[in-house]
Amino acid sequence: MPDTAILQVSHLSVSFDTYAGKVEAVRDISFALHRGETLALVGESGCGKSVTCRSIMRLLARNANVDAGEILFSGEDLLKKSNRAMRDIRGGKIAMIFQDPMTSLDPTMKIGKQIAEAVRLHRDVSRREANARAEELLSLVGIDEPTRRYHQYPHEFSGGQRQRIVIAIALAADPEILIADEPTTALDVTMQAQIIDLIRDIQKKTGTSVIFITHDLGVVANVADRVAVMYAGRIVEIGLSDEVFYDPRHPYTWGLLASMPTLATDSETLYAIPGTPPTLIHPAPGDAFAPRNPYALEADRIKEPPLFQVSDTHYAATWLLDPRAPKVYPPESIRQRQAAYQKRQEEKEAREHG
Amino acid sequence: MKAKRWVKYICTRLFYMALTLFIITSATFFLMNALPGTPYNNQDRLTQAQLDMLNKKYGFDRPLFERYINYLGNVLHGDFGVSLQFSDQPVATLLSQRMGPSLQLGLQAVLFGSLVGVFLGVIAAMHQNRALDVFCSLFAITGRSVPNFVVAVLLQYIFAVTLKVLPIGLWDDGFRSTILPTLALSISPMAESCRFIRTEMVEVLSSDYIELARAKGMSEIRIAFTHGLRNGLIPLITVLGPMTVSLMTGSLVVENIFAVPGIGEQFTKSILSNDYYTIMAVTILFSALLVVVIFLTDILYQIIDPRVRIEGVQ
């Protein structure tokens, strides 16, 4: 695992001014994105994952305020950049893929032109060279007959193909970071798999770092090197994919994993986390998840838990990890996961040693 | 293949346009003949014998249906009859003399008005709910509510009376004499398109493909004019077409104020005096223009919006 951080988000807080009051959408989050890795941001709708990424792109709505923090990219704080400098970074160094491919493309412009436009914004090339590059990108993302399809309009493509075109636009200037904001949510399952394969494939070829936003843990397992679980504007657990999937420590992660159907699920009903996420207008003190958390301690209602270190790469924000906390056993399905994981690790070690 | 589809589409449309004109012409012909009174302005003093003689001269003694068939035949040959109020001049000559100024003023006003209006609308949308937007909206509301004859008089007072830079009226100074009436007429298309484009653009600018354009690293102004405007223009075309016709066919009041020898005045007079052939000719002219403009609008739609292109032409 490469350990050079290409992007470092530190103590970022973002709020929105609304008629109902100030919504604290992102509250003091920190994470690093390493060169060449895929980091998944996971959480329910409204947990702040998209807002975090939009802050990186500086594409927040007009009523949003970045209250604190810094976002270091190649040693420079993106939050302090001028609009003009930011325009060079957007699409040039950091590109973004959006959720709904059906509406992400300009319906009145040929798709080839939309790609070539992105090329010319960041590369000093002639129109002809940009067109050639656009066709190249189209075949890279798996659109057949790029020369013919260059001249077609978005409505002549299917949803999956449109998402491929959006990806082609994102790749136009060989970005160092690709932010995929729920790129498969609007697609059907077979398309999802194809798009995820495509993103992985491209990452292998180009070595781009990827931030993958999703609320679908099944998707995460396929793509991510590391996973950050977000709840109510905070990162509650972050670690390597295996660590988060097989040795989760935060009760919220337990809930998420328990509510995910697997082939091994034998009970008839699927688990659901009780309650709903809190509103983030004047959030109550303590752990925001406490009201929905069957394992909540008294401390959770009083003081926000810090991120406790589980391993070099694994952190979780729950008082359960405090040495003073009572010993708590996670739900049955999670214990099964942990056991299976442990067994696998032991087998792996055994194999390595002999 | 593509060309063939276009030819077929245009032929179909032309057929329907002809049909529309035929129906309008027929309806107007029968409705007009149902009006009370005669075209003779001194009919009270005419004896029955004199009336009969006049009716015979103009063919009004024939049965209505026969006159209708005759009229249609003449129109197809380009003969629109003679004007009864302007000493038996052929209607065609009369109209063609007066058509020019109205057409020119109308086109100029629509072109200038919609260009400025679209620009203001885009600027307003880009600054939604901020000072510039409020200013543009105020302008649009004012433009829509102040009648154009008030604007006309105001313009005359400022530019002709006080500053003395432009002629106050008449049609004898080439382009210079068209400026003030054009400005007066352009206020309403300007306000209308400003309001329209603003509403459209506010929506367009919050759409996903605009967000994608921002993520590409485009500047706001480029986004607004390359990706935004093309999408925002589509509904404006629909209102702009009929507006063009109503302006091209002359504004009675503005033409009067600037003493422009246009067609607006003639139409009103012809109705008041039962000048049958002029009413018919002007109606046919208006409808023809409207039908043609709607046709052009649809063609324009297909050029701007590729989605319509497929549905319309296939």
Image (cartoon, coloured by chain):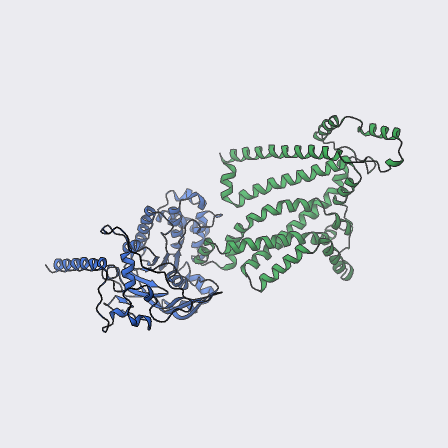
Which residue: 67% across, 52% down?
A: B186
Viewer-closest of A4 and A329: A329
Query: Residue A328 at what x, y percent from top left?
Result: 22, 66
Viewer-closest of A130 and B34: B34
Viewer-closest of A153 and A195: A195
Q: Is residue B246 above or below residue B129?
A: above
Position of A346 compared to B220: left or right? Answer: left
Q: Which image quarter is the C terminus of chain A in? A: bottom left
Instruction: Please say whether residue B171 is visible from this viewpoint.
Output: no
In the rendering, what colour is chain B? green
Q: Which chain is blue?
A: A
Instruction: Please say whether residue A69 is visible from this viewpoint.
Output: yes
Q: Is residue B75 above or below residue A295?
A: above
Position of A177 compared to B164: left or right? Answer: left
The image quadrant that residue B71 belongs to is: top right
Which residue: 77% across, 40% down?
A: B271
Query: Residue B67 at what x, y percent from top left?
Result: 75, 28
Position of A285 compared to B134: left or right? Answer: left
Query: Residue B288 at what x, y percent from top left?
Result: 66, 38
Position of A349 compared to A172: left or right? Answer: left
Residue furthest out toward the left:
A354
Which residue: 61% across, 41% down?
A: B294
Q: Which image quarter is the N terminus of chain A in? A: bottom left
Query: Residue A125 at what x, y percent from top left?
Result: 44, 54
**How many badges with numbers are in the image?**
0
The image quadrant that residue B133 belongs to is: bottom right
